[in-house]
Image (tube, coloured by chain):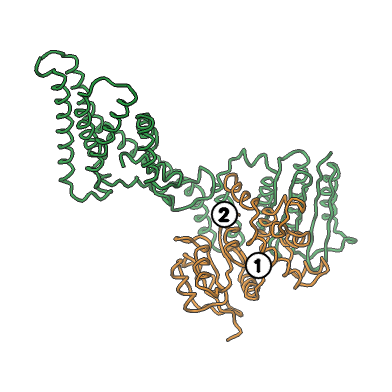
Chain colours: A orange, B green
Amino acid sequence: MSDKVKVVIVDDHAIFRAGVRSELTDGVEVMGEASGVSDAVLLIERTRPEVVLLDVHMPDGGGVEVIRRVAAAGDPPRFLALSVSDDPEDVVSIIRAGARGYVTKTISGPDLIEAIGRVHQGDAVFSPQLAGFVLDAFAGATADEHEDDLDLLTPREQEVLRLIARGYMYKEIARRLGISIKTVEAHTSSTLRKLQLSTRHELARWATERNLLD
Amino acid sequence: MLAGVCSGLALRYGLDPTLVRVFTVVLTIITGGVAALGYGVLWAVLPAGDAAPGGRRWKPRQGSRARVRTGATPPRRDFRGSWAVGFGAGFITLGLMFTFRETGIWWSDAVVWPLVIAATGTALIWRQFSYSRRERAEAGERDSRLGPFRGGVGIALLLGGAILFLYINGVLSSGGKVALGGLTAVIVIGLVAAPLWVRSARELSAERAERIRSEERAEVAAHLHDSVLQTLALIQKNPEDTRRISTLARRQERELREWLSGKTEADRADSLAEAIKSVAAEIEERHQVAIDAVTVGDRALDEDGAALVAAGREALNNAARHAGHAGPVRIYAEINEDVAQVFVHDRGEGFDPDRVPEDRRGVRDSILGRMEAHGGKAEIRSIPGEGTEVELTMEKKR
């Protein structure tokens, strides 16, 4: 039992929580469910899960607020964002708050379990959609304009993201690029870190433009 | 404190209301009353709006169509300071008098005290009458009996000021100067009646806001009726056909997202990325196969772009027909000003390029032919057992 990943589900929709719970069978132990921000913070403190499945949109600040408050208490678990939203602004803001990945609620049970395992190991989880957003967010930056490494994706990181957006799995990407799966994971993790830490003004502008145009 | 103009401005620009107020008073004194005029103008012009930040509880996605305002909260007013406002108005008037006197615009010392008293009374009346009973109740006015009392004192002060003015000017004793007496009466009546007029205008504006809200609600309801409820009915009628249910659900999701995004048809017509998404939707509909579309960047849809979209449609059609059973088909497009690339990826059985089935070769030719005719490239990679990917590249002509 102890090798199962300890998970809590945070979502304000009871039907959805029940659905996810019924799908999480192999290798995952659901420690509890919470329906709101304050509930979630208490539940996480009490059950000390390893991975939190976190809804982006909830009353009182949503997933971003949960991450903020849990992180403030110290020693936070890892967060995987789960949302119906495909609004780039939502996605990027929850990743920047500290989530290790983002998947849509239509994800299949086995894929979700795999994503939980990946987040648990400290890797990033990129759906094709998220890879697309990140490429969009970092598009247009060139090496000579930006001195800060955080503001740029390396050509290899871009290549990995493109293959994810095209629908390839990590092992297929590894084979295509002639690298190991671990290296693929290293690229996605460093992309995630850049997305979280970059102060690139284009990133902010990109979100604003989206807000106006999309 | 007077009409909420300062606090409104403060809220709008994120400043401390007290700071704005002090600034306004100082400005009034410096400019000799011109700023006070500005205050009046702003009061009349600024909308009585959603005061509290966070009044929009539900943050919609972008676009005005989707913007459903949830209950515009009227600005909270504090009525406890009414006396202070009355005396404040008196002092401000006194200050103005001195300012005018200093600057030389002056006619007679006799008007000072009547005007100060009248201003105090007027301020009290305005505080009392220009807000509706509901607004006062919402502001938590505890003792409702105090209200009319304040108003009465206000009227008494205003009348007292007017009579004093007339007395000092010798109207009452001589019985003459009818014009001045009449003018004073008109001003007094105007000052008493104006707040009542303002109050009814306010109530009218609240009614209008309510009407706009209910129209918005009706629009949302009509849309949900035509879309989501219809889809749910269809799903209930076909409970066994899981493939159809899934297609219906995906189509509904797509439509709802489009509607929430607030983009118009015109926005979509001119966009290469949107054209690719709509082709994905069309093929998904036709074959009842899930197709996930991801696009990065965008540019205007030109003739080359249209050819790229048409070739992409063929590739999707092909993938959906031969590999739709094996998980979602994916289309990924990366677009910038110089080059547009489209990838169509399926997880079907794949095929050996040397032994291409007849029907596939046809499609392949049509894809290749179409791209080459517009100066583009097409490449098809297939690995037996893993799936097929079609890569389309269209470079901008120089």
Q: Secondary structure at mark 1?
A: strand
B62 left or right, relative to B337: left
Q: Secondary structure at mark 2?
A: helix
Residue A213 image-quadrant placement:
top right
Q: Nearer the viewer, residue B287 or B302?
A: B302
For residue B253, the mark is: 2
Check the image and report above or below for B242 versus A202.
Answer: below
Question: Residue A86: x, y in percent?
Answer: 59, 56
Q: Residue at x 23, y 49 (%)?
A: B141
Question: Residue B115: x, y in percent?
Answer: 22, 28
Q: Amino acid at mark 2?
A: Glu
Can you identify the residue that label 1 sits on? A125
Local crowd size for mark 1, using a 10 Å CA cut-off: few (<14), some (14–19), many (≥20): many
Question: Residue A137: x, y in percent?
Answer: 67, 54
Check the image and report above or below for A128 versus A202.
Answer: below
Tell me the quarter of the image containing the N terminus of chain B. Answer: top left
Which residue in the rendered view is the most extreme toward the bottom? A1
Q: Amino acid at mark 1?
A: Val
Q: Nearer the viewer, residue B9 or A22?
A: B9
Q: Residue at x 81, y 51 (%)?
A: B363
Q: Chain of mark 2?
A: B
Q: Residue at x 20, y 23 (%)?
A: B110
Q: Chain of mark 1?
A: A
B232 left or right, relative to B363: left
